[in-house]
Image: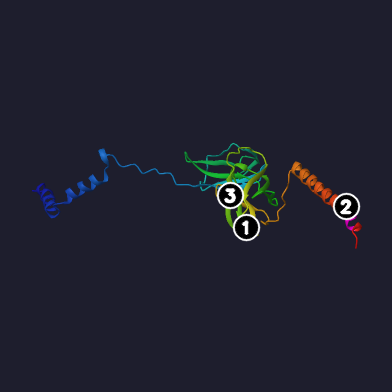
Amino acid sequence: MGSLLPLSLLLLLAAAYPGGGRARRRRGARAQGPGGSSPAPSETSAPFWVRVRPGFKAVQPGGSVWLNCSTSCPLPENSSLSTGLQRGQMLSGPGWVSYQLLDVRAWSSEVRCFVTCAGETRGATAKITAYKRPQSVILEPPLLVGNEYTLRCHVTHVFPVGFLVVTLRRGGRVIYSENLKRYTGTDLANVTLTYTLPARPRDFWKPVTCHARLSLDGLVVRSSSAPITLTGLAWRPAPKALASTSIAALAGILLVVGAAYLRKRPLVQTEPE
């Protein structure tokens, strides 16, 4: 009798909670991962950024520049710079490294900064442009030879010449433009543009100007000459042979006229009154 009492209590408890065992089994199934093992916690590296400043820099040929490479990585494993330019000093601090680049002569250079953080490497890019604004843009006074003007424009000490565009304007309108991309030199240079313009009365007293423009990866540098006015009184150079012939002809005419005058004068004086 005593052994039947505990058994009766167990049956009563099972009847009162019919889904208890199943609920426990479901909770146990949910707690298990695929294959019956517990899922491992996800391992994702924290994102970080890399920046290089300035992102674009223009210097004169032979100049130097400082670039700063910074990152948000708290413990960078490595930092490096990829460039073909000559390096100078290097300074560093928490989260940043500054590099000095010397004797920049290429018109365009690309520099890349790399940082490794938690086994991942990221980079940023900067561009450096070397250029020299024209020292002067000079338009010579036009020469009128026959029915044509000869215009000459001088652009001095400019670099890089291959990215130079020289334009002539008359009264604000473009009359000629030339792109000098065929020049590939890496030194300062002087450029002279010669252009022949028909002489028309309607163009007299209109100003003519010469313009030089450098276009370098979004950087545009402009220079221009003082205006020159077109007139019909421009200097007309004559060949030496033609000038000598004209002088000789004029001298001959004067001699003939003078001789005729001398022969005629005595006759007039000897006529009777």
Front: mark 3 or 2: 2
Horizontal arrangement in the rendering, residue 182 relative to residue 245 (left or right): left
The circle on residue 201 is 1
Q: Where is 16 relative to 123, above or below?
A: below
Q: Can you see residue 53? A: no
Q: Secondary structure at mark 1?
A: helix
Work out which residue is located at the far bottom of the displayed protein and give it: 273
Instruction: Quickly name the residue at label 3.
Output: 176
Outermost front residue = 272
Residue at (43% x, 44% y) in the render: 45
Circle 2 Cα neighbour tier, 10 Å, few/some/many (<14 / 14–19 / ≥20) = few
Q: Position of residue 139 (x, y in %)?
A: 68, 51
Residue 100 in percent (x, y) is at: 64, 42
Q: In 3D space, how far apart are the residues under numbered discs 1 and 3 (Cα atoms)?
A: 19 Å
Which sits earlier in the primary sequence, circle 2 or circle 1? 1
Q: Position of residue 162 (x, y in %)?
A: 60, 41
- Which label sits in the foreground, 2 or 1? 2
- Using the image, determine if residue 269 lies above or below residue 151: below
Nearer the N terminus, badge 3 or badge 2? 3
Q: Nearer the viewer, residue 56 or 14?
A: 56
Tell which tag, 1 or 3, sits nearer the viewer. Answer: 1
Q: What's the amino acid at mark 2? A: Leu
Amino acid at pointer 1: Pro
The residues colored magenta run: 262-268
Tell me, for residue 262, which label it has, or none: 2
**Viewed as shown, does residue 250 lie left or right of 186?**
right
Q: Position of residue 135 (x, y in %)?
A: 69, 49
In this view, 131 is above or below 261: above
Name which residue lies at 31% across and 42% down.
39
